Image (tube, grey):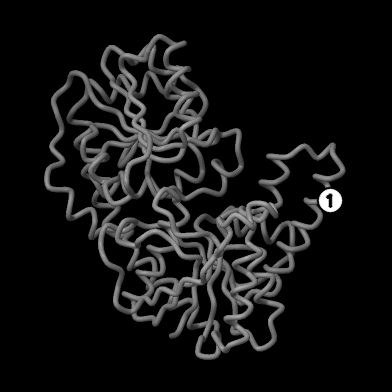
Amino acid sequence: MRLALIDPAPLRGERTESLQFLQLADALAAAGAEVRLLTPRAAGTAEILGRPVHPGLHLEFLDDPRHGLIYRLLGLSRSNKPFLARLGRWIAAGGLRDVDAVYVRNLKLAERLLATPGAPPLFFHAHEHFARVFREEHDLGRWRERRRLAALTAREGGVYRGAAGIVATVSPIVADIRADYGADLPALVVPNGVDLEAVRAVRADVAVRPAGRVSALYLGSLHPWKGVETVLRAMPRARSRVDLVIVGGEPHRVQELEQLARELGVADCVRLLGPTPPARRFEAIAAADLALLPLTARSGMASRYTSPLKLFEYMAMGKAILASDLPTVRDIVKPGMDAVLAAPDQPEAWADALLALAVDAPLRARLGSAAAAAASACGWEQRAATILTWMRGRL
C-alpha cells in the first residue's frame, strides 16, 4: 500500500504532534507500507526519534518560506497558506499519481485535498472534536468568534462526511463527531503508542529505591489543561517525602510555575528543567520513582479527547504512575493494577496519593511491573499494523 502522510506543521522535536506523526509514519513503513511524509522543511528526524527512520519512509520537504522577512511582514509567518500553495504545485505536477491513499490530521489541508479532482481516498486522524474545543476556549459572546465557529463547524462536518474513514485515539471523539455531524463514516479507535525500541535502549535499570524521599516526574507541555498546578498545590503536604521534577514547557509557563512554587513555599523541592531533547526523554523518565499525569477535568481536551503519549512512555519504562481519574486515562490503565488514579483538580487527593506511593516501595514496584507488561502490546508497529489493515479494507 502506498501512503502519503501530509502535514503543514514543521517537524520539530519540541512538538508532541511532530513526534506522534513521525512515529506513525515510521511505523507504517515498518508494517509494510510505502510511505511518503510531506511537511515543511524541519529539524533532523534522528533528533526527534533518536534513531534513523525506517528505509520504507521517504521524507519530502516542501520548502516553506513562512519564516522569511516578507512573510513575517505580510503576517503569514504562522499561516499554512505558503505550504498549501507549494503542495498545490506538487499535486499539479503529479505528486499524488502513485498514491493509494492520503492520511492527514489538519482540517484545512483535508478540505483542500477532498476538493482536489482525482485525489486518492483520504483518511483523517481525528485527535479532537475541533468545534467543541473551540467553544470551550473562546468567548462566543463576540460575533467574530461566532463567525469563526460557524466556519470551523462547516469545515469539520464536510471533512468527516467526505473522508474514507477517521482514525481516533479515544472513543469519545468518534461518539461526539457522530452525535454532532451525523457522520456515519467508518471509524477506527486505536490509542497512541510507544517506541519500544527506544525504551529497550534506555530501560537497563528500573530498580525501585526504598521508602524515603522519592522523585516524582511530570514530562510534557505545560498547557493549563495538563493540570500541573494541581501537583504544585499538593506539594506543601507532600514535600516531606517527595521531590517534584517538571520537564518541558515554554519559558513563560516555566516562569509562571516557578513563581507559583515560590508562593507555595515549595521552591526548594520543585525543579522545573524546561524542555529536554526528544531523543532523551526516556532518560528523564528512567531517573524518576513516580511518573505523573495530572490532567484537569475542566477541559474537554483533557477529559474526553487526549490519549497521552507520555502515559504510554511512563508505562513502558516500568514506572509507578499517578494520574487523574478521567475516562481518557481509564481507557489505558486499570486503577490499582498498573496505576493509581486521583481526583483531578484536587490537590489534597494528589497529596494523599503522592505520600502513599512515596512510603510504599513494594506498591511502586508492583505497579511499575504491571504497567510495563501492559505497554508491551502498545508499540507503534502494532498500532500501525492495525491501522494499515483497517485502511486496506476500505479501499
Instruction: Decide: is 320 above or below 174.
Output: above
Quadrant where the C terminus sits is bottom right
State the residue at coordinates (52%, 55%): 170
In the image, taking residue 241 as reference, residue 123 lies left or right, namely right
Report x, y in % for residue 386.
Answer: 41, 71
In the image, taking residue 119 as reference, residue 56 lies left or right, namely left
Instruction: Decide: is 139 above or below 359.
Output: below
For label 1, count other residues whose C-alpha is less than 10 Å away and answer few (under 14), some (14-19) or many (20+).
few
Report x, y in % for residue 336.
Answer: 33, 36
In the image, taking residue 58 as reference, residue 111 lies left or right, namely right
* Near-viewer residue (180 or 258): 258
Residue located beneath label 1 in the image: 147
* Near-viewer residue (237 or 120): 120
* Near-viewer residue (193 or 376): 193
Q: Which residue appears farthest toward the front when viewing the image?
A: 69
State the residue at coordinates (33%, 38%): 339
Instruction: Decide: is 108 above or below 323.
Output: below
Tell me how many marks there are: 1
**Hey, which quadrant is residue 206 in on the image?**
top left
Report x, y in % for residue 296.
Answer: 53, 33
Quadrant where the N terminus sits is bottom left
Q: Which residue appears farthest toward the right when viewing the image?
A: 143
Report x, y in % for residue 342.
Answer: 43, 29
Instruction: Decide: is 179 above or below 330.
Output: below
State the residue at coordinates (55%, 85%): 96
**Hey, which quadrant is residue 158 in on the image?**
bottom right
State the residue at coordinates (50%, 30%): 252
Mark 1 is on which residue type? Arg
Is disc 1 placed on a helix, strand or loop?
A: helix
